[in-house]
Image (cartoon, grey):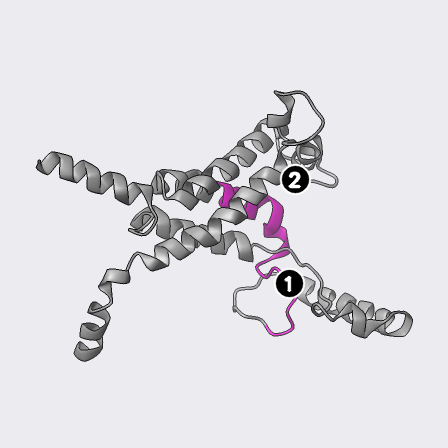
Amino acid sequence: MRAFDALVEKFSGFDGLPLLLIRVFLAPIMIYAGYGKLQLGADVGFFEQFLADPNVVGWFGNPDWGLGLPLPGVLAFLAAWTELIGGWLLLFGLWTRLASLPLMFTMVVAAGTAHWDNGWHAFPEAKLTVPWEWRMDLIEEGNQRKAAAIGLLKQHGNYDWLTEAGSITVLKGGIEFAATYFVMLMVLFFYGGGRYFSLDYWLSQRYRDNVLS
């Protein structure tokens, strides 16, 4: 173990690489999610285009087919801009720790409101990847419907063509992705954006040099 630790120590100069990869991984996901909630580019007035899309607001507030949250317009607006602005800040490594906090909160809200009732797994995998799945009923029902859909497609469709780009599956919609993003954001919150392509690191180095001089 001492020899292994000494070997790992030789690569300490690359310790900023995992943080960079986490940022590059998360940034487009957050930017796209935030952009999709807004009316940017839509045929609306200048100020209206920066508000949340009415369909998104309806999904936030409707208790029958949506989340049934109070103040849906405010919450949709805050979620959209948190994801959009936070994603860009992560991409450039600017105020990384500060940007991670509201994004972590957004992931908690998303997991608790939109995905919790669906359990852990995002897809009804026949072989579980974690032991804490609490909606085994959805796993079983999802696999039944997946088998039924495949049977119908094989019988009435060109199944080989339909599955050329990937196998047929059913979306279960558990908290798996939101929880994973939360953990990745927590890493950025505690360790920052790293030294590579990070404005935080550049600013900290410049500030330190100015202080020393």
Between 204 and 170, the one nearer to me in the picture: 204
Crowding near pointer 1: few (<14 within 10 Å), some, many (20+)?
A: some
Which kind of residue does numbered mark 2 sit on? Leu
- Residue 15 percent coordinates (x, y): 28, 60
Between 198 and 170, the one nearer to me in the picture: 198
- Residue 206 percent coordinates (x, y): 20, 38
- Residue 50 percent coordinates (x, y): 59, 26
Q: Which residue is drawn at 36% across and 39% down?
A: 94
Q: Does the magenta stretch include residue 147?
A: no
3 lies above or below 176? below
- Residue 139 percent coordinates (x, y): 67, 66
Q: Does the magenta stretch include residue 118?
A: yes
Q: In which quarter of the image is the N terminus?
A: bottom left
Question: Element type at marker 1?
Answer: loop
Distance from Cα at disc 1 to Cα at disc 2:
20 Å
- N-terminal label among 1 and 2: 2
Residue receiving disc 2: 67
Q: Which residue is drawn at 42% across and 40% down?
A: 89
Q: Residue at x 48, y 56 (%)?
A: 180
Is mark 1 in CB contact (under 8 Å) with mark 2? no
In the picture, the disc for residue 193 is none
In the picture, the disc for residue 123 is 1
Residue 91 lies in quadrant: top left
Which kind of residue does numbered mark 1 sit on? Phe
Kindly give the residue lying farthest to the right in the view shown: 156
How many numbered marks have been drawn onto this rendered protein structure? 2
Q: State which region is magenta.
A: 106-127
Q: Quadrant of the C terminus?
A: top left
